[in-house]
Image (spheres, rainbow, N blue to C red):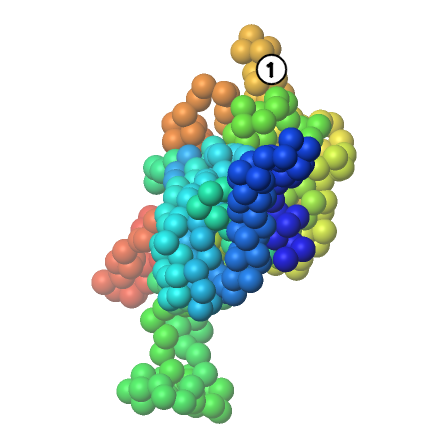
Amino acid sequence: MREALAGLTVRGRAFLAAGVTAVLCAVVLGQPALTRVGVLVLALPLVTAFVIGRSRYRLALVRTVTPQLVAAGQPARVNLALTNEGRTPSGVLLLEDHVPYVLGTRPRFVLDGIGHGWRRHVTYQVRSDVRGRFEIGPMSVRVSDPFGLVELGRAFRTTVPLTVTPRTVPLPQIPLGGAWTGSGDNRPRAFAIGSAEDVTVREYRRGDDLRRVHWRSSARTGELMVRREEQPWQSRATLFLDNRLRSHRGQGIASSLEAAVSAAASIAVHLSHRGFTVRLVTATGEDPSAAWHFRDADLNTGPLLEALAVVQAVHQPHLDTGWLAEGTHGGLTVAVFGAVEPMDVPVLRRMQHQAGSALAIALDVESWISPAAGDRSATTALAQQGWRAVPLLPRDRLDATWQELGRSAARGTRAGGITVTPVAPAAASPTTGSPTPGSPVPGSVR
């Protein structure tokens, strides 16, 4: 009852004041009829408070968000399932769900006719143009009487997360080199040198087909060896994102950092669907939640996009190099840089030296301040350290820039690669059986 009296609305308090005033005036003026009116007006909010306070209602809420991982600019649907497990009616419900302001206005609902076993389903949409991780809830519930005299507040403490990932664009297929490293899923690989017996056999494992046993290698090693037509190799890629505050310009969703995050997200999705196992590295080092993984491509992109959704600008001046201390070398490295300073050159050199193929997109960050203030120093610095780099301006299309990066990588491969040409066996001399003078030697490199 004390809580119900504290929940009197302005209307309920006005009724109390009017009832007391009417009773006092009736006593002073000696008007019994006015006394009855005053008592009725005074009793109405008190009786309402007593009924609302004595109501035994048990409200339950189940909130679900579909999907929980949504791209920026795309809507998500919030479903509310409300039930009343109490035995007495609860009047009118005023519901207000708390959502961050970037997801839109707070939804409000009015539900009446609440009795025992009452159930209602409510749905509303949220949408955000800003990436990040947001909590939807808690929900405030106000129970009111039909006259609006008493209003009691309740709250559901539960919340559900919603992750808004960066915007992504489909990228075209481009040649990527230096990608095969480590061991993992079986993938075909051609061998240019060495004996086939040395590179296409492995130890016998329980369940192997006995018809694949290679008896000559087994006799030489003393253990059962089986033929292997495919070498277990895997395709790995390191995605680097420079998220230092000093390397970017602009504010909010129009900043160069947001463009860099969107580019990194598009590259991560593209590489994952091309069969790469991708890990994310930022200026603060490797993200454990986005390390190399061995799952389906659609499942691989989830942790990467979630990590990119919460990437923020950091104030540290130097790039973390702890992830470069690994013993593994080679593989593909794709980086998205902002401004590059002279103190970053040693790190860039180490990154390029460790990678089998180093590709970079360098944002012309000065163009985010003024379109006329272009600066290609980052692209030049990366090229001087052996990177295949292309610039990205605010009005440039990412897919076209990615295509240009592929052409740059292809030109570098043709310029610096060695082509192995298969040569037919040399013709033997009819008299000596030796190769004819001037004929090519088998296995020569041209």
Residue 66 visible here: no
Amino acid at pointer 1:
Ile
In this rendering, the answer to whether 211 lies above or below 186 is below
Q: Quadrant of the C terminus?
A: top left
Callout 1: few (<14), some (14-19), or many (20+) C-alpha neighbours within 10 Å?
some
Q: Quadrant of the N terminus?
A: bottom right
Question: Which is more toward the observer, 401 or 243?
Answer: 243
Residue sitting at 57 percent across and 44 percent down? Answer: 39
Q: Is residue 377 visible?
A: yes
Residue in view at x 39 percent, y 66 percent: 116
Residue 366 position, x and y percent, is 61, 17
Residue 72 image point, x, y percent: 45, 37
Which residue in the rendered view is the most extreme toward the front? 30
Residue designated by label 1: 369
Q: Quadrant of residue 414?
A: top left
Q: Position of residue 246 (x, y in %)?
A: 71, 28
Residue nearer the viewer, 369 or 126: 126
Q: Secondary structure at mark 1?
A: loop
Q: Residue at x 59, y 30 (%)?
A: 257
